[in-house]
Image (cartoon, rainbow, N blue to C red):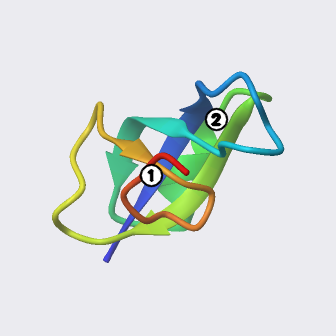
Amino acid sequence: MKICTAKKISTQQHLNNEFEVVSIHKSFDLAIKNVEPAYIVVEISDDIKRGDSINNDGKKWTSI
């Protein structure tokens, strides 16, 4: 598993929690060093890459 920082890209928060993966790190400590206030830090699986869309649980994002 990896840790990523991701920024919110959905506009309807109560319907879609879509985030774009901005950076991927090996540890939580590395991830929080350069995190922006509007970003989340979440654990992701190894198949997720930078630029992918994820939900707030760190799983691949799918539309409702």
**Residue at 38% over, 37% down:** 23
Nearer the observer, 27 or 37: 37
Q: Is residue 39 above or below residue 32?
A: above
**Residue at 42% over, 65% down:** 59
Where does the image place residue 24, in percent across and percent down from the top left?
Answer: 34, 48
Q: In this view, does 41 lie above or below 15?
A: below
1 or 2: tag closer to the N-terminus: 1
Q: How far is disc 1 from disc 2 in space, using C-alphas?
A: 10 Å
Where does the image place residue 10, in percent across and percent down from the top left?
Answer: 63, 28
**Residue at 49% over, 63% down:** 58
The amino acid sitting under disc 1 is Cys
Viewed as shown, does residue 54 lie left or right of 10?
left
Q: In this view, does 12 lie above or below 40?
A: above
Location of mark 2 (residue)? 35
Mark 1, residues whose alpha carbon is within 10 Å: few (<14), some, or many (≥20)? many
> For residue 4, which numbered disc appears in the image?
1
Most distant residue in the front direction: 64
Most distant residue in the bottom direction: 1
Nearer the observer, 37 or 10: 10
